[in-house]
Structure formats: structure tokens, C-alpha cells
């Protein structure tokens, strides 16, 4: 006969060894999560809040490098004054940074 019989191995010993092989992979994923993914999600959340809270009078910098003062706020776009009498429309999502915020107006008693 040309076929040799196959002998089964004990299944109990291989189960723990297979799990031990996945421990480094799990550790690498946890390290990547806490060092890269979580801080990036935190920064993205702060940026969304920053963009949502832009109001008239704030000085902003766009991702294209345009520095200007917000003249008009609409739903998804802003009108930014980049020089005296020169206004451009900017999409809200292109705001990279708010340089200075306007102070809230105090109530007169």
C-alpha cells in the first residue's frame, strides 16, 4: 500500500500554544491604539468643536494659509475679510486654527 496512515495528535496541547501566539499581536494593537489612534480621535474632536464655535469677529487661519477676520457666518461657509474691503468665502471645514476669539459683549445694567 502506498498511503501511510495519519496519526492524530493530542488537541489539548495546541490550544494554549495557539493563544500564546496571538498575545504579541494583541499587545501591538493595544499600543497602537493608545499611542496613535486615541490621540488622533481626541484632536479631531477638538477641531470639530473649534470649527463649530467660530463666530463673527474671530481671526482664523485656513488650511491654505489665508489669515483673516470672520465677517459673516452661514451654515457651511464663512465670509472672511482678508484685507480692508476684500472678502472671500471659505468653507467651514477648511479652518485650521482660530488665532483670536472675540470677547463676549458684556450686558449693560
Image (cartoon, rainbow, N blue to C red):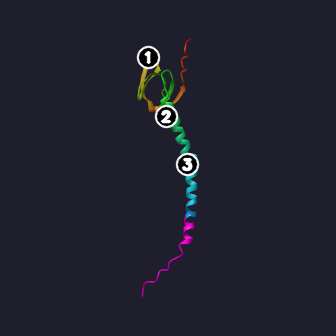
Question: Which contiguous range is marked in magenta?
Answer: 1-18
Q: Position of residue 67 (x, y in %)?
A: 50, 25
Q: Residue at x 44, y 30 (%)?
A: 92
- Residue 13 covered by magenta stretch: yes
User: Mainly helix, strand or loop, the magenta region?
Assistant: loop
Q: Which residue is mark 2?
A: 48
Number of residues whose C-alpha sits closer than 10 Å to that of mark 2, classed few (under 14), some (14–19) or many (20 or more): few
Q: Nearer the viewer, residue 54 or 95?
A: 54
Choose top left, top right, bottom left or bottom right for residue 99: top right
Q: Earlier in the sequence, mark 1 or mark 3?
A: 3
Q: Residue furthest front?
A: 109
Residue 99's place in the image compared with 11, above or below, is above
Q: Earlier in the sequence, mark 3 or mark 2?
A: 3
**Cα gap from disc 1 to disc 3, whole angstroms:** 48 Å
Question: Can you tell which of label 1 and label 2 is closer to the viewer?
Answer: 2
Question: What is the number of the mark on residue 33?
Answer: 3
Number of residues whose C-alpha sits closer than 10 Å to that of mark 1, classed few (under 14), some (14–19) or many (20 or more): few
**Cα gap from disc 3 to disc 2, whole angstroms:** 21 Å
Q: Residue furthest bottom?
A: 1
Q: Which residue is mark 1?
A: 85
Name the element at disc 2.
helix
- Residue 108 covered by magenta stretch: no
Choose top left, top right, bottom left or bottom right for residue 87: top left
Amino acid at each position: 500500500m502506498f498511503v501511510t496512515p495519519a496519526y492524530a495528535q493530542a488537541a489539548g496541547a495546541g490550544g494554549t500554544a495557539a493563544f500564546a501566539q496571538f498575545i504579541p499581536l494583541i499587545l501591538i494593537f493595544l499600543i497602537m491604539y493608545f499611542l496613535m489612534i486615541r490621540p488622533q480621535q481626541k484632536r479631531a474632536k477638538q477641531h470639530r468643536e473649534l470649527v463649530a464655535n467660530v463666530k463673527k469677529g474671530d481671526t482664523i487661519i485656513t488650511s491654505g494659509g489665508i489669515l483673516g477676520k470672520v465677517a459673516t457666518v452661514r451654515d457651511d461657509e464663512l465670509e472672511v475679510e482678508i484685507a480692508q474691503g476684500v472678502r472671500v468665502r471659505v468653507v467651514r471645514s477648511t479652518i485650521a486654527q482660530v488665532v483670536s476669539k472675540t470677547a463676549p459683549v458684556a450686558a449693560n445694567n
